[in-house]
Image (cartoon, grey):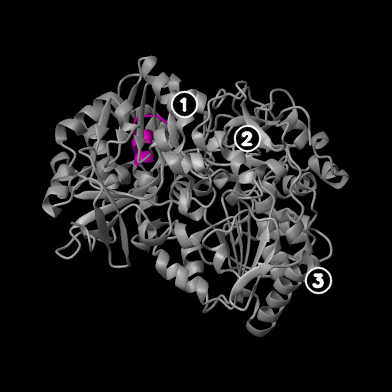
Amino acid sequence: MPTASTPTHCPYCALQCGMALSPLPTGGVEVVERPDFPVNRGALCGKGRSAPAVLSSGVRLTTPLVRSGGSLVPAGWEEALDLIAGEFARVRAAHGADALGVFGGGGLTNEKAYALGKFARVVLGTSQIDYNGRFCMSSAAAAGIKAFGLDRGLPFPMEDIPRTGCVILVGSNPAESMPPALRFFDELRENGGTLIVVDPRRTRTAEHADLHLAPRPGTDLALALGLLHLIVAEGRIDEEYVRERTTGWEDARAAAMAHWPEYVERITGVSVPQLRQAVRLFCEPGAAMVLTARGPEQQSKGTDTVGAWINLCLATGRAGRPFSGYGCLTGQGNGQGGREHGQKADQLPGYRKLDDPAARRHVAEVWGVDPDSLPGPGRSAYELLDALGSDVRSLLLMGSNPVVSAPRAAHVEERIRSLDFLAVCDVVLSETAALADVVLPVTQWAEETGTTTSLEGRVLLRRRALTAPDGVRSDLEVLHGLAARLGVEKGFPTDPEEVFEELRRASAGGIADYSGISYRRLAEGAGEGVFWPCPADPADLEDPKAAEAGSELTEPVDGGAGPRDGGAGRQDGGAGRQERGTPRLFLDRFATEDGRARFVPVSHRPAAEEPDEDYPVLLTTGRVVAQYQSGAQTRRVDELNAAAPGPFVELHPRLAARLGAAEGDALAVVSRRGRAVAPARITPGIRPDTVFMPFHWPGEGRANSLTNPALDPTSRMPEFKVCAVRVEKAAGTP
């Protein structure tokens, strides 16, 4: 074990807070602050501080498990890998390669995400791969690509937030989802700026706002259109900016003008005076930003909703200017990098499109395969889960727990149970792993080196601080072993730096260009990371063949990235390769063919499921500060369970009075898909027509038993954030 503290990053959310791990005399490590990292300056939430608790052998898996006689029993690694490879070979021979599925996770490092995508396409030959990051920010990604030609969660660093004039924060609660980020918004206000929070609940974040707008769930699109209507009507358009840096304004303007204030008030429940106040604050002279998160994105019209907020930024000249712009607050630790390099059903490394012939040729050359051998795009995450047990007969799952996290979760659990074969790689025995035929115990963040990409597009190096327990292997070792058993002896190294070197070459010339980033460079200086895009100088590429090719990487390889810097324009000093990469995008041009941002005309439409006589209340879901995602890891930490021991139903006093419910009473929330039971938590901080449930728990309190899998037509994002329910006192409640 190292004797000095090891600088690294938190394993949880996309803020990727800097921390250090210091060895304890009794074994293990403790978290110590790392105040030099600019994003959190040493601050950590309870999840980050307690992260080492999951490293304990009493909490995590330390031996492979194989199902025998209906139960999971300990087994050896060779037996477990032989069983998985044999089953995959059998299913492929009997039903074809697309009968094999792969489901990844937004917590996997870039190296593991890259290797998993390569494994699916090269070794298994299947198109059926996606990951739980589809449930994170896919709508924002789709809208960003339409408008800007490029998607990076934030096109500027977090440090720019306090330096703007006004932020509209839509459907985000960083006080609970990423607490160290809240200081950026507090500093904004201390500097004289304004914070507007859009959320149907008066969250802890909304308590910090200058203005809180509480729209009815599922109406964020109408709200954005109503604000744009007022901006036009009040003559607040930046005409010069629209003329010189955008296209498509007239159609977007016409769509917005159909959403007059009184009409929007009826749809959203936000009063006309509040709409006018929001416009006045946002349009004060100077810079401004709109930041979205899961609230507007996890809807069956999430892409259009985000597009409407982007239109608001473009119409007022607040994109591609200093301290202004649209950004998305990514949720999962590596949700950004996880899709950039191959886990997503339609993407190849470097954020290349799988159906682009030039992209296929480039990546196939790096992989040493025929481009025609690569499968085409496959199903999106929910569609893949829905196909389990029918078209998809066997599944390899890494770092995800869809039994708790997927919409219509009872149905997804049923589909998983219907599989011929399920293999799971995880650090704990999650609810999904408990259903597997083989469970492989894999290394965690503190036991492996690898890179992640934060919500800022900042590529970071996590360093190994501990030796994994006996019986535990890395995901890279798993893929290496399975590939060899399935006839691919080379191309799946177990050293993460070697994998990253190949990733650099595969991403070169793509939109998400990492070719100028190396482990050496990430470790240099204060370890603040490097922002993509970061094209390579020839000397940067340590692989001799790649170095020889580096001089050719001055034009887009796939023909669609725009300028060599991924279409981002020459910014932050003008060089294509910067010491920090490209912290700020779009200052000179957007990543479109003509360098202009595109307005996309959108119109309001209802949620996929509206309240009716049988289901008269709206349900929305979200997080609590002490738990994370499906809770598979955080629910194993005593400190976090003491703070958040279980699910609850948050409801307004007027709704509670109609139900005759008191604080703590067991309430049943029922949708067309299922039923969940949890104690009542009564607060005036939520709309009377809405209830809220956190989604971190399995069992009878599983919120995703209720949620609607209706998909956005572009992003294929399910409608987690709004569905119709009825609420009643549970049987046995006085």
**Relative to 265, is 672 above or below?**
below
Q: Is residue 42 magenta?
A: no
Give the spatial CA distance, label 3 vs label 1. Answer: 52 Å
Badge 2 element: strand
Residue beneath label 1, please?
A: 321
Residue 345 shows in this picture: no
Badge 1 element: loop
Magenta segment range?
A: 309-320
Q: Which of the two discs, 2 and 1, sits closer to the camera?
A: 2
Determine whether, in the image, residue 700 is placed left or right of residue 687.
right
Q: Which of the two discs, 2 and 3, sits closer to the camera?
A: 2
Residue 96: x and y in percent read 64, 80
Residue 660: x and y in percent read 13, 52
**Relative to 622, is 355 above or below?**
below
Q: Tag 2: residue type?
A: His
Give the spatial CA distance, label 2 vs label 1. Answer: 30 Å
What is the crowding at mark 1: few (fewer than 14 residues within 10 Å), some, or many (at least 20)?
Answer: some
**Relative to 430, is 254 above or below?**
above
What is the crowding at mark 3: few (fewer than 14 residues within 10 Å), some, or many (at least 20)?
Answer: few
Q: Tag 1: residue type?
A: Arg
Determine the image quadrant of residue 325. top left
Determine whether, in the image, residue 694 is placed left or right of residue 500.
left
State which tag comes first along the sequence, 3 or 1.
1
Q: In the image, what residue occupies the spot 55% across and 47% down?
A: 335
- Viewer-side residue, 270 vs 186: 186
Residue 396: x and y in percent read 63, 66
- Quadrant location of the N terminus? top right
**Relative to 36, is 371 above or below?**
below
Residue that sits furthest to the right in the current view: 544
Residue beneath label 3, please?
A: 487
Residue beneath label 2, please?
A: 9
